[in-house]
Amino acid sequence: MEMERMIDKYFRPGRLPHIWCPGCGNGIVTGAIVKAIDKLGLEQDNVAVVSGIGCSSRASGYLDFNTVHSAHGRALPVATGIKLAEPRLKVVVITGDGDATAIGGNHFIHAARRNIDLTVVLYNNNIYGMTGGQYSPLTPTNSKATTAYYGTVDIPFDVTELARGAGATFVARATTFHTQILVDIIAQGILHEGFSIIEAVTACPISFGRHNKMGSAANMMKWQRDHGLMLAAYDKLTDEQKADKFPVGVLYKTRAPEYTAEYDKVIAKARKGEK
Ligand code: SF4
Ligand code: MG
């Protein structure tokens, strides 16, 4: 479908224009979610989009599905409630690095542990953009931030490894440069029956790029092109060569009992009075 028709169909024109800064990658990631849903031919009424708080989480307001713009770090508990109440819905969670891995970190690991069928798209711009450029648990060490004027000393999570360790059954990553792959892995994540996490590496030229002298938004996308390698190519690198690179694509996929399906069995037993 052409982009113009897609905007008419999947966005709420009354809520536009969006608040994102010129050059922000959030529109590319949001566009990729819409393209993935369109590619799968899902009915809008059968999709719920839940977000937390932050620049990326504004996306839920722009999109014409069943949407909730929830509280900071709390998108996953809200999405969990929706999925348990209406398991037929495809539930997509939009969150950021600060939202999902700092205040929402506990919810993140427990949703992954339960293997509940949610698709999390984590917009990783390495910073708290909306609140003014504080560093997050995904900000690389030695980065400048408004709360780290001389550079951060914290070691960041690799959120894909965190998710995998916590029990996620579909783990993938792409960037706003690798857009076709991003669309494809979001679609795969939506189809996967279990907890899916897609890390979308995106540029915040204002709150991260400016402090870290990364140049224009276009330069930040070139950085994504030069540092994100397809998994097969990444795996061939030596450890030294891997140091400043990251893999792109489906990084891990397995099957495990899905939470709402297991919970349905409990409901069936309870209805029959079985113990
Ligand atoms: Fe995008 Fe950064 Fe601006 Fe937020 S502050 S809208 S993430 S460029
Ligand atoms: Mg962020």
Image (cartoon, rainbow, N blue to C red):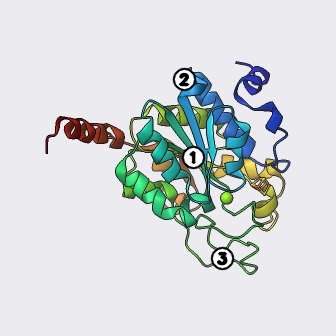
Residue type at mark 2 is: Leu
Image-based side of 270 in relation to 92, left or right: left
Whether disc 1's CB lies below 8 Å from ligand 2 is answered no
Is disc 3 in contact with disc 1, using a CB cutoff of under 8 Å? no
Q: Are marks 3 and 2 in contact (CB under 8 Å)?
A: no
Q: Secondary structure at mark 2?
A: helix
Name the secondary structure under disc 3.
loop
Whichever of callouts 3 and 1 sits on the residue coming sooner in the sequence is 3
Considering only vertical position in the picture, is 256 above or below 166?
A: above
Query: In the shown orientation, is residue 9 left or right of residue 71?
Result: right
Where does label 2 land, which residue? 40
Mark 1 and 2 residues: CB-CB less than 8 Å, in contact? no
| Label 1 Cα neighbours within 10 Å, binned few <14 / some 14-19 / many ≥20 | some
Report the amino acid beneath label 3. Thr
Which is nearer the N-term, disc 1 or disc 2?
2
Name the mark nearer the viewer: 3 or 2.
Answer: 2
Q: In this view of the protein, can residue 32 be seen by the observer?
A: yes
- Name the residue that disc number 3 marks: 152
Comparing 128 with 161, the one in front is 128
Which numbered tag is attached to residue 229? Answer: 1
- Identify the disc placed on residue 91: none
Amino acid on which the number 1 mark rests in the picture = Leu
Q: Residue furthest left?
A: 275
Is residue 180 shown left or right of residue 236? Answer: right
